[in-house]
């Protein structure tokens, strides 16, 4: 440093020392750095410092800390104006002046003077509120240059007014500095909407408002600008009507949810968000949660039609619209699937299931995955006989074509079974093991897909024809800008086609094919096995390197690869150098590259993965489905960074829905498509879980898959209770037996007056002879026949095991509880029925909440009265609630498997239907009663005759509503049940 | 003499039956519908040597299709009033017993229990048939043999072959023949070309996978032969199979479509 320069600095410091010692010290401390400056720059800076020290000493400290290079770009006028401003401020509020200088110095030149003036005005407005708090706030406001640089002047007051509202959650200092920088790039309308949203939420839920303030902008960063604007506008409009808790659940993953909407649907979704926010704001969170699913199931046109229907519904019935937009009602799903050309898995699954079972000799349990591709996912657990198929195929012109494609895809899954894809033990796990290339699984889908499909085509000429038909059509879908996994699909299509097809392929695809196809050729031989496929895939892996940012060791996240590559327009795999990143859309911001991805990802996901038993890498579908399933997400500090990167944010997964939802299988027991009673094979346990719809009278529709029912084993008591009861009612048993034996099923009736039969009717023969003699024509009806009274009945006894059965009605029963009396009645009934041989079954039910309805098998129709059954009757015990509707529906499913002419369902209960979430309104039983009534009607429609027996003296009140007048009975004295039940049975069943 | 009905052995059933015949052991043929039980017994009735002449024509096989209303008199016989007279007419069982034919009770489990019990005296060493209406105690002709058939898949709790009955019989299990054998049978019976016959046999094999899960019976060889005949007469294979297999087997549209899909995959 030149001595003159040094001396100038020293002098300046000395001059300052008098008024601003701190500034002087800072100046001296910066000597080494100032030494590196160009002399002119330094001189000017010192000069400015002089003037500042004279005119507005309060700004000296700020000047001393400022960047000399910055001043180089400023003209004197700006500086003077600024200094003048500081001076004026100092006249009224010195502290404020200091803050002003410090906060806005760095903005000089970047922000127009008017902006600074506006900010100052705002600061004064705050200041004017009076009190030390306001003063402090004003200071902080100014010091945090963030707001001034980011927000336009008009919004500044909206911004700083938030500070006191969020004061509990966010210290004011933090508030002002925490303004996310990304907001600065938004259009003013979006910024305003966002601030309004925070305001609206701040009243009711400061925690949520704080989260929206601090983290939402970055979470929404990857979105296209118009979509983001529409989302914010919708949220802020709907905010006053929303429950904060609902929004909180969707919030952390909002970016990912909305980001999943494909470009063509953006316009429709924008309109939909605006409309829903305007007409049915409460439905907004639910709608946001199902956006990924909606996008998969419907194209833009379909979505628009669906949305219109929903809005029309909103005009009539707000609750129904809520369920509609959350895809929770049957109507909603039907409208969505109603595309005339779409082939839907729900409808076709019965046919496809049988098809695959016939071809491969193993049962097949379809489960829906997203996306139509030739390279469908392989099964993690082949023993579960799952079969991954797209939920919807709507890629071709007509329904027939889509259905044909669907069948082809199903046939490919068959081929995997038939040609030994699963011969390699733990296939999926081995492909995702550490040390394997991350793209290995996707590539094996390509290579093994080739092998399997070639063999299929050889063996089944019909499938070869289907393939030849499908290949050109599938190829037409391939685009150079498509995601890598779709490009792999295109490669597979090309590999399976012939020369003519290859000639028609676009140039970029042919180039890739030239590299890949020769490697596939050996897999076409009949001796090729799955191991060969894996070997070829490994050899191809270097061609498909993931973006260099990703850590190749994180094989556990290989499943997320397609998601990431999709989201961030991953590396090109076509080999022709064209940029695979999506062409710019309407003024989009460049998406943030996931630079620190692996560590944070490992952090966030690793913890949650550790809690779950069976999750070896969540697939994108599973994650999405998780979110829709209402998984409770907890927001934690310090993960905000990750949210910025990915928008996908999973810290804690509650509930066991993961296993069942992920393997969304639809095994229809009744053999009718899309009927209630879907059965999901549970991954870890042997108990099956059944899903049933429930009738919600408020929305006037069924809630799809609302209740989960499990069959739970009953602990046996070695038949003790059974024997004991028979001994106790020793006098009753013979009486019942006698009663039943009077009308025995083996009874034969003699039919007379037949023209052909076993034996003569002597009376008729004599008459005939007489007629003959009298020269009249004798009747030919001379024979008799003994015909068996066929009794083809089956009865299911459905026993309420709710907690209330633990009560004892008192003296009348010598202290016995209702459950004991019921069990006695069952024992007597069973003993009697075993005698006469009528088919019957016994099941109990209870549960707790709609997710946990329990069904207890005591005796199935095909079981005899074995000691085990006797033990189970004794083992029945009081449990929980009474969700009658679901239990009835499952009983109907059981009865449907029986082929008797006359089927009866006898419900034994002690109270009205109730459960902790049997209807939104916990005070009223109306929901439960209506749902039970509907279930009873469903049973009648299925050809079953229900009958309700209750020991609740007040039973008339609700049974009247639920059942037909002759289809129920109230037993006045509980103790009479064992005696009455056989009589009731007699009247009902045997008389039919 | 007419040619023996065509039957292609699948296992050792022919040898077994011959041995049973030699010893006059009653036989129970078990198997699903349309797998060849009746054809088998027709064939055997034709080829087995007769010990004594029955002097009553050439009737070697008497078949009774059993059903729920089958009464004792349907089997044994009854009186009919013809004009002025009362005439005793032998039932099929009595005819066989008297004249020495094989009496074949098809789907015996359908009949009433009190009817089935009538055959018990014929199945032990006495080989007697009491006909109480006429007061006779018939001793069976030396060439008489009792053969029953039933379909184990049909069994329900109520329709069951009592052990006191079934333990009087030697049981031979019948199943659908393996693909190449079935192809030969189809080719012979329907006259369709061998390649098509093999396709039809493959179809049969595939469709039977569906019944393995308990969703109904598998397709009988008979139906496949019908399909073959239709194909030979010029009906397009897909349509022939649709008519003879999918729509014959099931009324459930999903099952029908699924079977049609398999037909499409096999036949192209």
Image (tube, coloured by chain):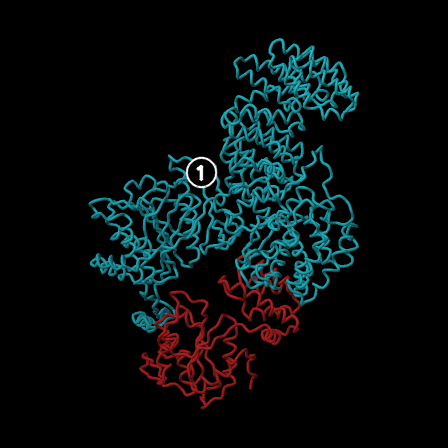
**Colour given to chain B in the rendered image:** red
Rendering quarter of residue A865: bottom left
Residue A63 spot, x, y in % from top left: 69, 18
Q: Residue at x 57, y 48 (%)?
A: A618
Q: Chain of mark 1?
A: A
Q: Is residue A235 visible in the rendered structure shown here?
A: yes
**Secondary element type, mark 1:** loop
Rendering quarter of residue A495: bottom right
Q: How many marks?
A: 1
In the displayed structure, would residue B215 be above or below residue A980?
below
**Colour given to chain A in the rendered image:** cyan
Residue A773 spot, x, y in % from top left: 33, 73
Task: Name the outermost residue toward the top.
Answer: A91
What residue is disc 1 on? A697
Q: Residue at x 58, y 17 (%)?
A: A138
Q: Nearer the viewer, residue B62 or A427?
A: A427
Image check: A106 left or right of A507? left
Residue A304 spot, x, y in % from top left: 62, 37
Residue A596 spot, x, y in % from top left: 64, 41
In the displayed structure, would residue A304 be above or below residue A873?
above
10 Å crowding of disc 1: few (<14), some (14-19), many (20+): some
Task: Name the outermost residue toward the front.
Answer: A3
In the picture, the quarter occupied by the C terminus of chain A is bottom left
Q: Nearer the viewer, residue B145 or A148?
A: A148
Q: Is residue B85 visible in the rendered structure shown here?
A: no
In the picture, the quarter occupied by the N terminus of chain A is top right
């Amino acid at each position: 440093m030149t001595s003159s320069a040094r001396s100038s600095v020293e002098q300046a410091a000395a001059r300052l020392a008098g008024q601003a010692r701190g500034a002087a010290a800072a100046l001296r401390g910066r000597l080494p750095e100032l030494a590196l400056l160009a002399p002119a720059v330094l001189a000017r800076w010192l000069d400015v410092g002089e003037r500042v020290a004279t005119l507005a000493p309060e700004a000296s400290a700020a000047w001393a800390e400022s960047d000399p290079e910055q001043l180089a770009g400023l003209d004197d006028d700006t500086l003077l104006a600024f200094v003048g401003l500081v001076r004026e401020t100092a006249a009224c509020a010195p502290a404020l002046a200091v803050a002003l200088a410090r906060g806005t110095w760095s903005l000089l030149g970047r922000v127009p003077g008017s902006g600074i003036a506006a900010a100052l005005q705002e600061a004064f407005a705050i200041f004017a509120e009076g009190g030390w708090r306001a003063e402090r706030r004003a200071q902080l406001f100014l010091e945090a240059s963030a707001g001034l640089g980011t927000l336009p002047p008009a919004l500044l007051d909206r911004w700083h007014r938030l500070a006191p509202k969020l004061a509990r959650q966010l210290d004011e200092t933090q508030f002002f500095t925490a303004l996310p920088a990304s907001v600065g790039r938004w259009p003013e309308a979006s910024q305003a909407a966002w601030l309004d949203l925070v305001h609206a939420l701040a009243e009711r839920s400061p925690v949520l408002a704080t989260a929206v303030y601090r983290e939402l902008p970055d979470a929404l960063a990857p979105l296209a600008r118009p979509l983001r604007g529409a989302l914010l506008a919708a949220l802020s409009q709907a905010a006053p009507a929303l429950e904060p808790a609902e929004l909180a659940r969707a919030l952390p993953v909002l970016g990912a949810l909305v980001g999943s909407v494909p470009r063509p649907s953006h316009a429709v979704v924008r309109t939909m968000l605006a409309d829903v926010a305007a007409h049915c704001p409460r439905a907004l969170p639910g709608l946001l949660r199902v956006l990924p699913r909606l996008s998969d199931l419907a194209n833009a046109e379909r979505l628009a039609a669906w949305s219109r229907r929903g809005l029309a519904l909103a005009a009539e019935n707000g609750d129904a619209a809520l369920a509609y937009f959350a895809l929770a009602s049957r109507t909603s799903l039907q409208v969505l699937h109603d595309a005339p050309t779409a082939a839907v898995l729900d409808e076709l699954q019965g046919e496809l299931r049988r098809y695959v079972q016939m071809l491969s000799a193993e049962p097949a349990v379809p489960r829906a995955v997203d996306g139509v591709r030739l390279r469908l996912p392989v099964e993690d657990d082949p023993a579960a006989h799952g079969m991954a198929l797209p939920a919807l195929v709507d890629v071709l012109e007509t329904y027939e074509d889509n259905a044909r494609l669907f069948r082809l895809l199903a046939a490919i899954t068959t081929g995997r079974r038939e040609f030994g894809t699963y011969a390699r033990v733990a296939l999926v796990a081995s492909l995702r093991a550490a040390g394997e290339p991350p793209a290995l699984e996707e590539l094996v889908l390509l290579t093994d897909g080739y092998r399997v499909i070639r063999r299929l085509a050889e063996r089944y000429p019909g499938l070869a024809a289907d393939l030849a038909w499908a290949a050109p059509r599938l190829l037409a879908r391939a685009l150079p800008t498509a995601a890598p996994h779709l490009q792999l699909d295109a490669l597979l299509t090309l590999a399976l086609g012939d020369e003519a097809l290859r000639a028609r392929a676009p140039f970029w695809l042919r180039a890739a094919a030239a590299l890949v196809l020769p490697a596939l050729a050996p897999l076409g031989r009949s001796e090729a096995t799955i191991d060969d496929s894996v070997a070829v895939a490994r050899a191809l892996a270097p061609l498909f390197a993931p973006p260099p940012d990703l850590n190749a060791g994180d094989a556990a996240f290989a499943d997320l690869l397609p998601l990431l590559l999709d989201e961030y327009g991953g590396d090109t795999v076509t080999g022709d150098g064209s940029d695979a990143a999506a062409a710019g859309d309407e003024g989009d911001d460049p998406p943030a590259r996931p630079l620190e991805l692996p560590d944070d990802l490992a952090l966030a996901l690793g913890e949650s993965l550790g809690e779950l038993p069976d999750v070896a890498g969540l697939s994108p579908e599973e994650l999405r489905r998780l979110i829709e399933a209402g998984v409770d997400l907890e927001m934690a500090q310090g993960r905000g960074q990750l949210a910025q990167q990915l928008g996908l944010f999973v810290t804690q997964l509650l509930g066991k829905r993961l296993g069942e939802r992920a393997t969304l299988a639809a095994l229809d027991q009744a053999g009718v498509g899309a009927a209630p009673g879907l059965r999901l094979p549970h991954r870890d346990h042997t108990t099956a879980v059944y899903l049933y719809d429930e009738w919600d009278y408020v929305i006037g529709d069924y809630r799809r898959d609302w209740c989960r029912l499990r069959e739970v084993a009953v602990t046996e008591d070695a038949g003790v209770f059974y024997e004991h009861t028979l001994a106790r009612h020793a006098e009753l048993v013979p009486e019942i037996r006698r009663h039943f034996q009077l009308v025995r099923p083996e009874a034969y009736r003699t039919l007379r007056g037949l023209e052909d039969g076993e034996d003569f009717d002597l009376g008729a023969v004599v008459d005939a002879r007489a007629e003959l003699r009298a020269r009249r024509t004798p009747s030919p009806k001379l024979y008799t026949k003994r015909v068996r009274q066929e009794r083809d009945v089956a009865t299911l006894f459905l026993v309420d095991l709710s907690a209330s059965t633990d009560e004892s009605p008192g003296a009348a029963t010598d202290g016995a509880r209702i459950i004991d009396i019921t069990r006695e009645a069952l024992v007597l009934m069973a003993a009697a029925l075993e005698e006469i041989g009528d088919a019957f079954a016994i099941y109990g039910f209870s549960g707790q909440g709609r997710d946990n309805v329990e069904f207890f098998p005591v005796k199935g129709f095909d079981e005899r009265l074995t000691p085990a059954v006797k033990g189970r009757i004794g083992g029945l015990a009081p449990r929980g609630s009474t969700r009658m509707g679901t239990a009835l529906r499952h009983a109907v499913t059981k009865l449907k498997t029986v082929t008797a002419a006359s089927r009866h369902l006898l419900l034994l209960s002690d109270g009205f239907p109730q459960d902790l979430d049997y209807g939104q309104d916990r005070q009223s039983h109306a929901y439960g009663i209506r749902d039970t009534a509907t279930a009873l009607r469903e049973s009648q429609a299925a050809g079953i005759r229900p009958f309700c027996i209750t020991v609740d003296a007040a039973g008339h009140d609700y049974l009247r509503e639920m059942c037909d007048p002759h289809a129920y009975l109230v037993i006045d004295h509980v103790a009479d049940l064992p005696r009455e039940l056989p009589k009731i049975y007699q009247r009902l069943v045997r008389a039919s | 003499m007419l040619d023996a009905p065509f039957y292609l052995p699948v296992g050792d059933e022919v040898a077994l039956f011959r041995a049973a015949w030699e010893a006059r052991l009653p036989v129970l043929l078990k198997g699903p519908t349309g797998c060849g039980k009746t054809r088998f017994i027709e064939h055997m009735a034709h080829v087995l040597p007769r010990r004594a002449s029955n002097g009553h024509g050439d009737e070697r096989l008497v078949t009774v299709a059993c059903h729920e209303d089958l009464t004792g008199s349907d089997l044994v016989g009854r009186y009919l009033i013809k004009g002025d007279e009362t005439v005793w007419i032998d039932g099929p069982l009595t005819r066989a017993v008297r004249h020495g034919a094989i009496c074949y009770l098809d789907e015996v489990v359908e009949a009433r229990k009190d009817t089935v019990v009538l055959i018990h005296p014929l199945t032990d060493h006495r080989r007697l048939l009491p006909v109480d209406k006429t007061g006779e105690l018939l001793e069976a002709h030396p060439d008489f043999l009792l053969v029953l058939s039933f379909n184990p898949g049909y069994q329900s709790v109520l329709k069951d072959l009592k052990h006191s009955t079934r333990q009087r019989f030697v049981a031979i299990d019948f199943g659908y023949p393996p693909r190449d054998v079935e192809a030969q049978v189809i080719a012979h019976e329907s006259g369709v070309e061998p390649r098509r016959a093999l396709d039809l046999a493959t179809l049969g094999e595939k469709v039977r996978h569906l019944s393995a899960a308990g969703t109904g019976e598998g397709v009988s060889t008979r139906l496949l032969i019908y399909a073959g005949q239709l194909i030979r007469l010029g009906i397009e294979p897909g349509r022939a199979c649709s008519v003879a297999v999918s729509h014959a087997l099931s009324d459930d549209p999903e099952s029908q479509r699924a079977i049609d899909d398999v037909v499409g995959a096999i036949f192209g």
